[in-house]
Amino acid sequence: MQIFPPYADTIARAALLATAGALLGGLGLLIVLPFTAHVTRQDITVEQPIQFSHEHHAGGLGIDCRYCHTSVEQSRFAGIPPTETCMTCHSQIWTNAAMLAPVRRSLAEGDPIRWQRVHRLPDYVYFDHSVHVAKGVGCSTCHGAVQRMQQIRQVAPLTMGWCLDCHRDPAPNLRPKEEIYDMDWSAPANQRQQGQKLIHDYLIRTEGLTDCSRCHR
Amino acid sequence: MSGATEGLLPEDASYGSLVGTVADPLLRRKAGRLYWGFFAAAGLGTLVMVVSIAWLFIEGIGIWGVNTNVVWGFAIANFVWWLGIGHAGTFISAALLLTRQPWRAAINRFAEVMTLFAGSIAGLFPILHLGRPYRAYWLLPYPNTMDLWPQWRSALVWDCAAISTYLIFSLLFWWIGLIPDLATIRDRAQTRARQMIYGALALGWRGSARHWHLHDVLYRTMAAMALPLVVSVHSVVGMDFAASLMPGWQETIFPPYFVAGALFSGFGMVVVVAAIMRRGLGLEDVVTPRHFDAMAKIVLAGSVALWLAYGTEWFNAWYSGDPLERAHVAHLFTGPYAPAYLLQLFCNLVAPQLLWFPSMRRRIWVVVTVTLVLQLGMWLERILIIVNTLTHGQLPTTWALYVPTIWDWMLLGGTIAFFVLLFLCFARLLPAVAMHDLGKLLHERRTEG
Amino acid sequence: MSAPPLTRRQAALALLASAAALTSCDKPEEEIVPYVEQPDRVVPGVPMRFATTLTLNGYGRGVIATCFEGRPVKLEGNAAHPASLGGTDVFLEAAILSLYDPDRSRAVRQGLRIGALDNLVSALEPRLRGLEARGGEGLRILTGNVTSPTLLRLIGAVKARFPAMRWHAHEALGEENARAGAALAFGRPLSAMPRLDRAAVVVALDADPLGPGPDQPRHARGFAARRQARKAGGEGFSRLYAAEPVLSLTGAKADHRLPARPEEIAAVAAALAARLGLDVPAPELPGPARGFVEMAAADLAAHPGEALVLAGPWLPPDVQALVHAVNARLRAPVDYREPPVETPEPLSALVEDLRFRRADTLVVIGANPAHDSPAALGFAEALGRSQAFTLHLGPYFDETAALCRWHVPETHPLEGWGDARATDGTASVIQPLIRPIYDTRSAIWLLNLLLGDRDTGDRDAVRATWSAGRPAGEFEAWWRRVLHDGVVEASAAPVVTPPEPRLAPPAASTPGFTLLFRPDPSVWDGRYANNAWLQECPKPIIRQVWGNAVQIAPEEARALGLSAGDVSRLRLDGRVVEATVLLQGGMARGVAALTLGYGRRRAGAIGDGLGTDAYALRPADGSWSAAGLVLEATGRTAEILRPSDAHRIEAEEADLFPSLELAEFQRKAAGPPHEEEKLPTFYEPKNGDTYAWAMVIDSTLCIGCNACVIACQSENNVPIVGPEEIARGRDMHWLRIDTYELGPEENPRPGFQPVPCMHCETAPCEPVCPVAASVHDSEGLNVQVYNRCVGTRFCQANCPYKVRHFNYRGYADGQEYANLGAPGIAAQRNPEVTVRARGVMEKCTYCTQRISAARRAAEKEGRAIREGEVTTACQSACPSRAISFGDKRNPASAVAALRDEPQHHELLGHLNTRPRTTYLADVRNPRPEGGT
Amino acid sequence: MSAPIVLAEFRDPDTLVEAARRARAAGFKGLDAHTPFAVEGLSDALALEAPRLRPAMVCAAALGAGFVYLMCWYSGVIDYPLNLGARPLHAWPVFLVLAFEAGILAATFTGIAGFFIGTGLPRLNHPVFAGRDFDRASQDRFFLTVSDEAADAERLAALLDGLGPVSVRALQP
């Protein structure tokens, strides 16, 4: 007595394969997902209280990064400018621009501007801007061509693996001191040699760069 | 009738009657009140387990009795205990197959199921005991954005590898053996639904000689792999302790001692399960006193092995002259847990000596009682290995006590209930004895005769 | 204290749910909120350090506070301040937590209800006018010890406005006996400051200079200066004798110790005086005491000018006077000064006045006598029944505040302006590190209010005090320097040469079963009861946390039919309290000791209802002992909470805490260089071409004061677990002080061994971690990566030192004890250290954040980290400088030198763990002819 | 399966073996047997080829073990070398433990896969299921099946004469 019709074979085999496929595919998806921009938040622009354009300020006007991000050479944090920094210029120019109303309100009411964070590291990561710029890592290495961004966005994945790429082999990303804030910097042809030389000149001890305690404590 | 198969099958057995003995309780008999009583009790116990696990996830392992110095407690002891129980099934099935022990046939199926259930329950504990169980997958190697790998030197990674391998292997080994029996059930099923379900599960097995041939090769090959695997698994569990620096743990005898202990407790549990299955499913014809006699001998051998292991531990502590090891052994006999240790020695070393007497081995209730006692003994052994060392470490200022909480007990009790529940389900859903092995045994007997 | 709030559970469920999804696509948005106007010098992420002053019993101790973005997070000793000398004690370290205590009073109260400050002022002003009209008749001010020049100036002004006003001061742990003794000897109440750093022989008669108190850091440093066992030598190694009824830290460090009842100590003092040729009758002494006196007297006599006898503040004035006479004979190194404290009228007079309605306006500033005055004095009842207008200014709505008509919350010293003097008179200014967190007022404000001045700010008041008599042009520069240095230069009271002391032979006192009252090493007189760090800090020697207990000698307990953990009833003059019995070897027979400060009823969520209130038994005169105690069992038992017990060293365990006599040390030091044999290993640790951090702890110098424990807790965001968790055997202190009992059982000499992580080079914890959360870095630190930890706890299981601590609950992360989850407390957290989540292991990191900061600073400057640039929190706290830290590869470093000392040893070195934290053995200096 | 199938049903496995031997000797093609358990001698009687499962499993084991060993070595020595208590980076005894487990796992999966490929299972619908009494092939009857153009029930019955088959029938199409 046949219990199953002939097409049951196909169903059974297909079901078997589908189960295996779903398991493997699901697993694969879980593995791949953290690498994607959904998780790393790469290239996502966030709505900000003020449509501040780095393209205009850094690219067009050529204002130095440190004009606003003042503590980048002293502190872990590069620093977000206080309202008064905006007003040094905007008390003179564009004084009535609607776009800048929140800035004026902030100054008038003493109420800080609440920016949405774009570059975000977990709380247990202790990244220090100052030591990076002191040792030849330029702004654009991690932040990309900010001077061409209408809206700021995160260009690097900022994952631990990405950090490690450079901590394992910093040579390709090191620049001479005077080029740190050069947003248009691109690696010269002899970057490998130059990087090795900079490692030596900056007294970078590469052996400890992948210590867990470098970033976590 | 020759000796090898004597007393294993009824005198008047036929192929059909054997199949009926096994399959009829499943297909033709309704579960009795006793069954549902047990089922309800076990279900309630399982609920206790679920509740205690849920509370554990909500509140954290702070609900247990573990503390700063005694960082491991019931969870690890339960893990080792359940895994020890989970050792016998695959081992029985494989080792007895390879050594052609005729008494394998009636018990291997539920022994394997016991392995699966106990092993799965055991596998829960290392995850439950984590401070952050939702990060358990970090023990597996997989490409990740952190560029990190598991730390291969840790015995816990070996555990993770060995246990998952063992569970997967045991599941497949059991499944391969089960397929022909599912076909038997399919063919005896009277309702369409059962035919469909068992039919689908049997994958269209039709007993073809080619299939049997391949089945035989695969099954025997897997059996041959099972032996080193089984040994490796509990050796690795032993190394959880042996690959450490703590007095009472750092002992080279631990891997074999753990394997012996695991087989000891595993066989003990098979005895218990066999007795219950035999009564519950009316398998008196195929699970006979001869089986209990044979298993009792193995249990006895296990007890003797434990004598050797314990004796070696004590002797080495004295002979090494290491004050820490000596202090540890003294602590075993005089510390706060000495009564439990003495009970453990009684359960594992003294009680099984009863089985030297053939008359005792033939009395099923005696064998069952002894094996139940040794389950207690083996659980005590595991918990005492942990707490006696951790409460009495190298620095006397770190000596502390370990007191389990209600949640510790609830989880242990709950998993026992869950084990019973799983077995009750198994007994009603799948053939409890490998019918094709019984048929083969009968064929062998007839050929001999 | 009970179950955590529901929100926590929901959060846990949410966490699980998100974990189940493995990765979440929509992370919650996070805001960056910059300043509108960035204050000068503030750089987000860069800490700033300010000098200020904290007080204990009114005496100033200088601290350096570290602030992040205007938020003080850590206090350390100010090296320029003579009462701190760069070290701290537990109270200084823990003060930062009190600043953020959510139970601090934050509102004006009228009775028990919330009141308005304006109502208070309008109620007070007519009353003041009336008082003024009466010349101040009926006005009373009650304070604690006041050393503050500004407060004294203002009190003086108040007195000028209200001439009949009377000022009372109350300190539960006062110095009346010492003052009276000095008055007896010299005719005036001079303060005597022993110079331990100049003493070769010290005989402490029930004195505990190394114990808790305003001068603990100073005395510890002085003691340590003469206990340096080094190959290179140094000043002569001193010898310390102690005779005392209760085992104190001084007794623990003593080379010879005599357990003696209080009256026996008087006899010992008399016998010593007689032996040294003073004209006092030599009393009959029992055998051990006779031997003790023989040795001590011989040693004292042999070291003129370098020998010193100390009398504890709890000895009666006549004994104090006798000791002054002895010291005069010995030309002892003691600095006599006029005390910086004025001596107002005592509390007892105020009680009388309240009772007889002679006081109609009472202003209480900072004091809490309703709890910490003897119940027998009846202050609380008098205050409660009084119809007077009562106003209380204090940091908490405490027992006294609840009995007053008005309560005004007081500004924390870290929030306000002020000044204080140290015990030697050195003045320093208190400057605010943060705006007052709540709407609080200071004592200066209140006194100004009494003066009718509501305009002068606290800062101006303090400046007014100090600008007086200074040329206006120089003042600003001077002021800035004072604020920067944290101390007013050369402001110590001059050392005076006292007149020849009069001899006053001590009177015989009443024998009998005696109850001794002692300051509590955790809560002092009760004022720190709501400080969870202090409550959970194991008290030295007895190791108890979260409460107090009545201490008696084990033999005494046997005689009384009591055993450890029995709840006993203490009867004294008809007053009864219950306390748990704690057995402590080294106690004299016939005495029981109970610390003051527990049994608080209105301390806050942390301190309420803990322990036994010893004030309930204290005699009305506030004396330190009371005879006629009856101690009986109640039949109940209670658990004494101790994270770990002291352990009696058996012979075979001697290598756990090696101890050697000075002669043996000198023999070893003179011998060939000390070679520590290295056990063979398959895995020779590799030294990278970089720093090799190491710590050496000198057991000889460690006085077991716990400052390091609290410093570590403060620096590293170490959470509190609470008494229930302690009872389960859980605790989180990264650094514990293992206490070993050496010597005879009835007179043990505890040895203290601070145990942080050993940072083993062949660390057993590392290979067992399945996820490499426990791992070495290239500089030799054993690193615990919290965010990688999954919580298997294998590392701690395999740690022979058991120095790791597991977050069984979210101690800092949602399941905090009592009120410690309040949002304000998070402001104390050190932003440079991760706050650990539930389910992860943590442990001592050698303050890796400090190493990292130094490394980054050095790398930015293109140089190596200098010796001494990195100090760990425990090291910087240590008042006796027992902890050294540095790069052991640098031959010029202190640790490298110490690792070569002959008494250098590793803890459990035979396990071949190659620890980086190592110890110098306890060197003691008993008289060669022996005795205890 | 184009050729019709003829089934011969037996009560006893030994008879079946004998029948199979005869059928093969008679030159029948497409011989198979269906039995409730593996009958010794049947594969010889039917001259079944020895399956090459074991070599495949050994190869898989070697590959799996080798892969895991290399992965351990690469991760621990090359990719992220960590100082773990000064233990050597190349911890081969440990890597062997993991390689062993991986080998077992790889062999098992290969064996199972080989089994399914070799048997053609799952095959829920098969012509023989239509045979009368074939449901007893998994219980207590032993079937010889011949699938040969040249075979019909009569010829087979004649061949098996004397072995006492319960029945010899061609499958109803």
Image (spheres, coloured by chain):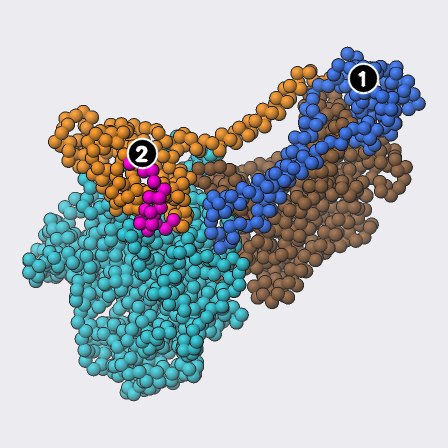
Q: Is residue C495 magenta?
A: no
Dot 2 corresponds to which residue? A144
Q: Residue at x 77, y 12 (%)?
A: D173
Q: Position of residue D13 (x, y in %)?
A: 85, 29
Chain A visual colour:
orange
- Figure quadrant of residue A71: top left
Kindly identify the amino acid type of the residue bearing the numbered disc 1: Asp
Is C463 left or right of C85, judged from the image as shown? left
Q: Residue at x 46, y 70 (%)?
A: C675
Colour blue maps to chain: D
Label 1 Cα crowd, 10 Å radius (few <14 / some 14-19 / many 20+): some
Please say if the residues under marks 2 and 1 sit with CB atoms less than 8 Å apart.
no
Colour brown maps to chain: B
Kindly identify the amino acid type of the residue bearing the numbered disc 2: Gly
Q: Compare residues D58 and C739 and report the one nearer the observer.
A: D58
Chain C visual colour:
cyan
Q: Residue at x 64, y 52 (%)?
A: B255
Give the structural element (helix, strand or loop) at label 2. Answer: loop
Residue C357 seen in this snapshot: no
Label 2 Cα crowd, 10 Å radius (few <14 / some 14-19 / many 20+): some
